[in-house]
Amino acid sequence: MRRVSIFGATGSIGQNTIDLIDRNPSAYNVVALTGGANIEKLAEDARRLNADLAVTAHEDRLDDLRSALCGSNVEAAAGQTALTEAAARPADWVMSAIVGAAGLPPGIEALKQGATLALANKETLVCAGSLVLETASAHNARLLPVDSEHSAVFQALVGEDMEAVERIIITASGGAFRDWPIGDLANATVEQASNHPNWNMGQRITIDSASMFNKALEVIETKEFFGVDADQIEVLVHPESIVHALVGFNDGAVMAHMGAPDMRHAIGFALHWPDRRDLPVDRLNLARLGQLRFHEPDEARYPALRLARNVMERGGLSGAVFNAAKERALDHFINRQIGFLEMADIVEAVLDRFEAADGLIDAPMNLDNVLQTDHLARKWADAAVIQKAG
Ligand code: NDP
């Protein structure tokens, strides 16, 4: 039996992963499931899948989790340390689907015990790319992409020589506001930004799709994951979300990966890799679709893409700064303290402040420095919001 753990089990990716495991439960021994506030769902799944351990990220919810698991054989734990300890439990395959930089420490721990890490949590590579890749290599652990674009690139590269790769093109749906006049974006509401035209995802990534901060993170993730230069990565807006990524080779050939917009494809690919297995996703009918459209993104509409390019050029810990400032800006937007377009202003202000502070971005990349940088960037993002309000 394959030992699997799912971090972020109660979320959108976590539930899609459980859906696949539920279809063949006798093949898996579930080591750990983790969640946050949704104790009921966590306990229900942990009982049904007969998990060894269930962990909530919230220390003060331990009693609730214990009560919800009462009478089962599932062990309960709570808090950030418990999450990292859960990741240290031997498992063959670990899904990293916590949202945000909180996914980084358990991801590193899972790599240290030599697991295959299925990486939905793009923040892991954005915040600490070289550290994560070095940890994987030192412990003979494997990283597999779960973001649909990166899974698509990975699949297009099977059997190919990286030396022959000229460029990687990742597609973007354009998010909730792709057809809005730019002049209306300043007044976009949280509800409007939370309504994705093609994908059914968690609220945070859905809003990040509308602002293209999600794509910005993915561009950085592409650079780290595939080891290409920033100028080899392109973004194309593709409203149908059928082509997830394309790889261009030095003979002019372009390999495109297509599939219905359903995350169970990328999750299933990572779960069964190196095999391909039957998956419960819609089959494409291109004749019915009739057309696939592509156009270049307008950076005036999506300043996050420009900021991502700056981050890739700057290197060091700037990815951790970018992500943390983005996470706080998103919190402030969701709490209705700033407008939709102000998120990018806050992130840029924090990046500039780090740049002006000698040595911070160029500190050595280790977990402590990444976490300290993340902490400071959040504080400075909060300060920038207060300054804007004043
Ligand atoms: P969701 O918001 O749906 O789920 C997030 C999960 O993380 C939940 O289990 C949540 O628990 C848990 N969580 C939240 N905060 C913390 C914390 N501080 N510490 C530990 N656990 C926490 O997110 P998604 O599933 O949409 O996304 C997860 C990751 O996958 C993100 O990095 C996202 O960018 C990436 N991704 C998602 C895609 C999608 O289709 N959804 C596509 C590609 C990548 P609870 O809900 O119980 O509070």
Image (tube, grey):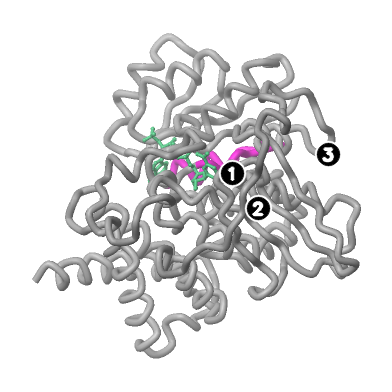
Q: Compare residues 176 and 115 and report the one nearer the observer.
A: 176
Q: CA distance from mark 1 to mark 2?
A: 8 Å
Task: Say which quarter of the image contains residue 176.
Answer: top left
Circles 1 and 2, Cβ within 8 Å, touching? The answer is yes
Magenta region, residue range: 81-97
Q: Amino acid at mark 3?
A: Pro
Residue at disc 1, secondary structure: helix
Circle 2 Cα neighbour tier, 10 Å, few/some/many (<14 / 14–19 / ≥20) = many
The quarter of the image holding the N terminus is: top right
In the image, which disc is placed on residue 274?
Answer: 3
Q: Residue visible at 29% across and 69% down?
A: 346
Q: Residue visible at 51% across and 53% down?
A: 105
Q: List x then y, in percent, for residue 307.
A: 45, 72
Task: Say which quarter of the image contains residue 16.
Answer: top right
93 in the magenta segment? yes
Q: Amino acid at mark 2?
A: Lys
**Of callouts 3 and 1, the N-terminal one:** 1
Q: Residue visible at 56% across and 55% down?
A: 237
Q: Which residue is mark 1?
A: 88
Residue at disc 2, secondary structure: helix
Q: Which residue is mark 2?
A: 112
Q: Nearer the viewer, mark 3 or mark 1?
A: 3
**Residue 121 to residue 49: above or below:** below
Q: List x then y, in percent, for residue 240.
A: 58, 41
Q: Compare residues 241 and 112 and report the one nearer the observer.
A: 241
Q: Amino acid at mark 1?
A: Ala
